[in-house]
Image (tube, helix red, strand yellow):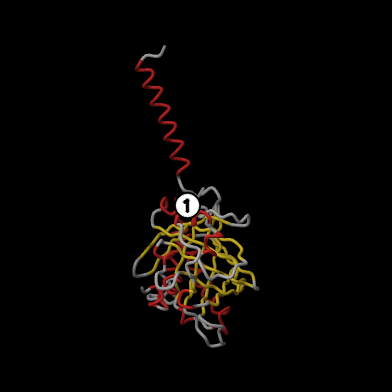
Amino acid sequence: MKTASQTMTSFTLASSVLLASCAVQANPVETSREYKLLLDPSHFNYATQSTTANNYLTDAKQAISNAISRNVTGSWALTKARQVAFYDTPTSCQLKQLGYIFRDRTSDGQSEVTLKFRSPDRFIADFEDLSSPDNQADTKLEADISTDINNGIRIVYSHSTTTPNTRTLNDMADVNSHFSGFADAYGLSNNLTLAKVGGLTINEYVFEGSEIDLGSIDASLELTLWYTSSPNASQQPVIAEVSFKYKDPNGNYTAKVVQRAKLALDAMAQMSAWSSTSSLTKTAFIYAATPNFCSQ
């Protein structure tokens, strides 16, 4: 028979194991980390965007290589040309109020929708239920790390699910049907009207093909340009964003990798001739375009 002391010791050990197990299971894993910087859109126009993109890349390669003593390879080519729209409930913006965005991207007639929740708290972001009944759905927890010369580094955690879509987007049923976890958690009526935020359809052009050697892992470097209409030759984008991203399904990022990534972002931010001091982020731009869209 165990003594009271032995019983208490066994209980303490068991409790410690249980708590350790729970801590491990509850620890959210960032499957990807994306670093973002807004550029001055006035440097670009549609007719010469590819040339200007690679002129920027040439300068960025030098700045990053000097900062981390690692190579930046490749060149940029246009890989994606697609239409982007955000949807919310007119006059109330209930998705935005809950911390969510609902986005549709269409390329070559094929639509995919994303439901995304953002929070500065990694645990809060991860606890949101983004589950989907769609067998092609892709869910991730990502650290979005941005900087500018006025405000410095900002980190927001985004928990999102993306899935193919064949529905016409016009009411909350289009969100609830794709994202059952969200539907169960918030119970928003299927009959709530959805509309394009600001009435905007964005023409998005993405340039890819360059990588940063961070050591044990490489980061893909890309440029995204947003136009509010089908662009003519001289038209300038409303948003120009450069970013780089690296991934690991287990979140096993080494100290050297994340330190080099921070130095790379700092080096890009110091390229003041290219950087923006006033541009809005993509989501902020969408919701600011028509300020009364969310007005009661």
Nearest the eye: 23 or 33: 23
The quarter of the picture where the N terminus appears is: top left
Nearest the eye: 114 or 12: 114
Q: Does the rendering let one see residue 156?
A: yes
Q: Does the rendering let one see residue 58?
A: no
Nearest the eye: 89 or 219: 89
Q: Position of residue 144 (x, y in %)?
A: 45, 60
Q: Mark 1 belongs to which amino acid?
A: Lys
Q: Position of residue 169 (x, y in %)?
A: 55, 70
Picture quadrant of residue 38: bottom left
Sort mark 1 into few (<14), some (14-19) or many (20+) by Cα contacts within 10 Å: few
Q: Secondary structure at mark 1?
A: helix
The residue carrying mark 1 is 256
Q: Position of residue 99 (x, y in %)?
A: 41, 61
* 215 over 174 or under it: above or below: above
- Residue at 51 percent of width and 75 percent of height: 56
